[in-house]
Every structure is written in structure tokens, then in C-alpha cells.
Image (cartoon, helix red, strand yellow):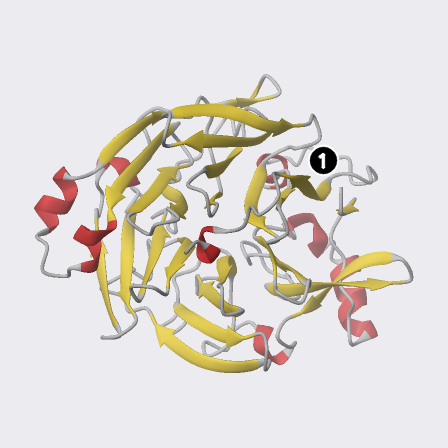
Amino acid sequence: MLYHWNHLDWNFPDPNMKQAFETGQKWKHAMPAGIKVDQQGNTYVSVPRWADGIPATMNRIVIKNGKPLLEAFPSWDWNRPGKVTVLQSVLGYEIDERNRMWILDQGKIAYSPSPDGSQKLIIWDLNTNQLLETITIPNEIAPYRTSFLNDLVVDNQHGFVYITDSGNGWPDHPLDGGIIVYNMKTKKFRRVLDKHFSTQNFPGFNFDIDNQTVFRHKPIRIGADGIALSADRSTLYYCPVTGRNLYAIDTFLLRNFDTPLKEISHAVRAVGSKGTTTDGMHADNRGNLFYTMLEGKGIGVYTPKTHQFHKFVSDDRMLWVDGVAFDQKGSIIFNNNRLHQMFNSPQTIDWSYPYNLIIWKEFVGPGVKSYLYAR
């Protein structure tokens, strides 16, 4: 256990900001989502703005008086809500082998439609602490009303980025899940597998955590969410949250923007059931795929060579394990955030409990790193 909180707190630059955050109890919807570690050993946390009042959506952990606090990254100005050129709501991001952060901005705040220009990829150089590029994701690729840009993987060897759009950005509306492919060289996007069965929710799907049905009175529907790229960059894996299947497709089909959409649709492979619904995924440099287990309260591993799924680590406190990444020193880093309790109505969290939100570390083996470091 690296860090834990009863609720998230920030290293505020202004006492008035801190007072507004605390008196308004905005921390009740401040949910740590993606966890990453850079080459200098800094730990980052995304906190999506699925409700109003989130101080900063992209953050770095700092220690103040022995307590872990969040600090806006790359700055407070870069996290200003309502300014579409800066970060609005971040869920997924990646830190590549060149120590560059690829930040996926959902654009929308509290499920309002994404304003024009707010959906984007921000590339930030962590070595020089400078902006490298801003890439806008247009409405025709990720519809501003329905899109829910979730997570991404980066392939610098071939020059592509793959993004999951869960399609649940418009509550009480049919899903519009899909996969988005970005070509770094041509600067063009393509949307594939739009509303494909593999990027949608499984019809009528419900699941339990601790023998309690998640969102019993209004079951969630989340399409393509978890995404992972194999170490040899040849296979893209993905999965919905509301379903247990793992899906795969050959990336050479996706890298060629002339491949007919119908051919891509027919090329999807159902790898099999993970035996649990999953949020985040991450592949290592040895061909294994690590996935979060919501029902299993932990982390599981899929080994393509043997086509086997098995449990890696579990703990009763791992309630809604969200993101998983590598520290490049042989360990995985992951977090749990009680999403199913935090966004339930009414909330079912004891906010005095010191282990509501946890960042974990678990050793995998010497030499084990992210897929990004595979050669």
C-alpha cells in the first residue's frame, strides 16, 4: 500500500479554494482514476470531472506534513474548467518510453456535451516540463454529446495511438461505443467498430461486488473501456465494463486507414471470458496482459501463450480497482476508488474510514516493465 485516503485532498495554492472544496463537500465526488509513474519516480493521478467542483483533473502526488496530497499538473492554470484549450476532464492517459505524457481530455464536465475544441490529446514532455502538441478530436470522430473518451495506448514504433470511446457520455441515451485510431504522421483520426457488439455493453448485464448488485436501481452501461497493446504491437485488446469478455484485433488492419470498416468488424476475436468485469488494463513487456477485477476485487492476468486467465492479487479493500500501470522496476501500480459507492445514490461510503481510496504496488518479477519498453 503506497498511499491511502479517507477522501482526496489537494495542496491548494489559495485558502479560499480549500475552504470552498471542504465546505461544499466537493471531495465526495473526487475519484482517483488513472495512476502512472514517470521515469523520475513521480506518481500521477487523474480525477475526472464527472461532477462540478473538482479542483484539478490532472495531478501529481506530493507529500506535505507526512500526508499525500494532490497538486495540479502541469499547473493550476492548465486545469481551469471552462477554458477549452486546457484540461477539462481527464480519465485516461499514458506515459510513454520517451517520458512523454499523452493526456486524453474527455472535454465534458458533469456529463454536459463537450464544447467544441475541448476533446483533445495533449502531449507533454516530462523531461523538460513543456507542451509538445495539442491535437483536437473532432465531433465526427467522437460525437460531443455521446462520447466518453476513456483510455489510450501508444505505439511509437509504428506511429499510432488507440483510444476507447465508451459511448456513455449521454445518460439515459443508447450507447455509442467505438475505437478511435490516430496516425501520428498524417495527423488524422479514424473511428472504427462504432456500435460494434464488442464495443457496446452486453445486453441486460448486471454484476455484484461483495454480493451487492452494482447500481441496483439503475444499472450502468459502459462500452469499450479497458485497452491494452501487446508487447510486439501486433494485437490490440479491449473490453467493455458491462460485460466479462476480452476482445482482440490485429493492429495492421487498424493502421491501414483504407481497410474497409466491414473487414475490421469481421476481424474482431472474442478471446474469452475473464470471469470478472474489468475497468483498466495494461500489457507488460513479456506478452502478458494485466486487467482489473471489479467482481474479484483485485488484478488478474491473461497469458496469450497458454490462453489462460488467472487471479494475480486480491484484497477485500480493493473495491473497484480502476487503473493499472508499471513502475518499470518489476512492479505494477494500481488503485481502487469505490466508484460504485461514490456515484451511487445515496452514497454508501463511510468517509471517516482511512482506506477508502488506495494506491497499491505489487511486485511481478525482475525485468518486468510496460509494453512500451518491449524491444
Q: Nearer the viewer, residue 21 or 130?
A: 130
Residue 210 percent across, percent down from the top left = 62, 20
Q: SS at mark 1?
A: loop
- Indicate the quadrant containing the C terminus: top left, top right, bottom left or bottom right: bottom left
Residue 205 percent across, percent down from the top left = 38, 25
Residue 213 percent across, percent down from the top left = 53, 22
Up/down of 88 relative to 329, above or below: below
- Residue at 40% over, 46% down: 228
Q: Can you tell which quarter of the image residue 296 is in?
A: top right
Residue 120 percent across, percent down from the top left = 39, 69
- Residue at 45% over, 57% down: 372
Q: Image check: 141 left or right of 229?
A: left
Neighbour tally class for label 1: few under 14, some 14-19, many 20 plus, Cα within 10 Å? some
Q: Nearer the viewer, residue 265 or 327?
A: 327
Q: Nearer the viewer, residue 77 or 294?
A: 294
Give the residue type at disc 1: Ile
- Mark 1, residue position: 349
Q: Image check: 162 left or right of 263?
A: right
Q: Image check: 251 left or right of 264?
A: right
Q: Can you tell which quarter of the image residue 320 is in?
A: top right
Residue 206 visible to the viewer: no
- Indicate the quadrant containing the N terminus: top left, top right, bottom left or bottom right: top right
Residue 319 visible to the viewer: yes
- Residue at 75% over, 48% down: 7
